[in-house]
Amino acid sequence: MKQYFLGIDTSCYTTSCAIVDEQGQIHGEARKILDVKSGERGLQQSNMVFQHTRALPKLIQELPQLPISGIGVSAFPRREKDSYMPAFLVGRGQAQTLSHIMNVPLYEFSHQENHILAAIRSLGMVPKEPFLSLHLSGGTTELLHCTYDESGFFDVKLIGGAMDLQGGQFVDRVGVALGLPFPAGSHLEQLALESDAYDALPTSVKNGYISFGGPCSEALRRIEKGVDPKNMALALFKCIGRSLEKLFDYHIKQYPVSTVIAVGGVMSNSLLRSRLEQHLRRKGITLLLAEPQFSVDNATGVAYGASLLHNK
């Protein structure tokens, strides 16, 4: 008899749920991006909790009614003991309630693991050797050294990332300054694809950590002076791409691997995906990318993770 697993993820900007079977095939998925007022660049945690609380029950009702064997949930941002964010309590509470009423096991993951698992499910394979995982989103810019421990979880070590501004914050601040809706990534990508000229923004990578603060300040100054939005969009992604290349060049010397998995909303960008893939290929490293719709926040990862743990 086929088994089905429910996944729930209530992250900073997306409410999502999904059902997959034991092979990782999706049988239902629903998600909603949280509402951000025009001109604003984010939400307070209390607003996230309020919107998740309203949206999640409705999204779950969009899923097919299937016999659930287990539930996976993003319970915290990272697996570290001090990792805490109220937005994830909404999904965790709903998952705990459903687990009790349905009498099925609950498996708790970090949002970090959810992204990795979503990519692995989309790719249909679990790396047996240590690999690097890049998580680039509105709330995170992290490079992780990961080892799958055969129990469904990952041994994860943070080795690099952003010193100040996160990659997605850089994108959204520039986008909002240009008058684009939040989140601005897809709108900026379209502008960048229409451009063939740009003035390079500075990059700053020291000891394996990126600083996006300086490049962002320079970008905002250029916007105030009336820079062409298309050229600014292209300069932005060129800056991020070059910064990522420097990040990997530094860490690959210390953590030689043959595989890199890149996840997160910013990594759904076609320009960054192509540039990073070519850069790593020249170094003999395979870049694994989830389909763009599963690179952004979604609950398929924890649903798939629940299936892995259940079958263990």
Image (cartoon, rainbow, N blue to C red):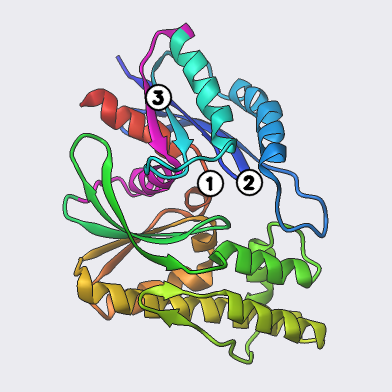
Q: How many marks?
A: 3
Which residue is depicted at the point 42% across and 47% down?
112
At numbered mark 1, what does the secondary structure look like: helix, strand or loop? loop
Q: Which mark is residue 297?
A: 1
At numbered mark 3, what does the secondary structure look like: helix, strand or loop? strand
Give the x, y percent position of residue 127: 22, 51
Contact flag, marks 2 and 1 (Cβ < 8 Å): yes
At numbered mark 2, what does the secondary structure look like: helix, strand or loop? loop
Which residue is depicted at the point 33% across and 47% down?
120
State the CA–CA distance, disc 1 to disc 3.
18 Å
Please identify the quadrant where the C terminus is shown.
top left
Q: N-terminal of the two: label 2 or label 1? A: 2
Amino acid at the residue labelled 1: Asp
The residue beneath circle 3 is 5
Q: N-terminal of the two: label 1 or label 3? A: 3
Residue at the front extreme, as displayed? 82
Specify the segment rendered in magenta: 101-127
Compared to residue 127, the image places residue 269 above or below, namely below
In screen coordinates, is 20 left or right of 91?
left
Give the x, y percent position of residue 26: 44, 34
Q: N-terminal of the two: label 3 or label 2? A: 3
For the residue carrying disc 1, how many other residues have a C-alpha within 10 Å: few (<14), some (14-19), or many (20+)?
Answer: many
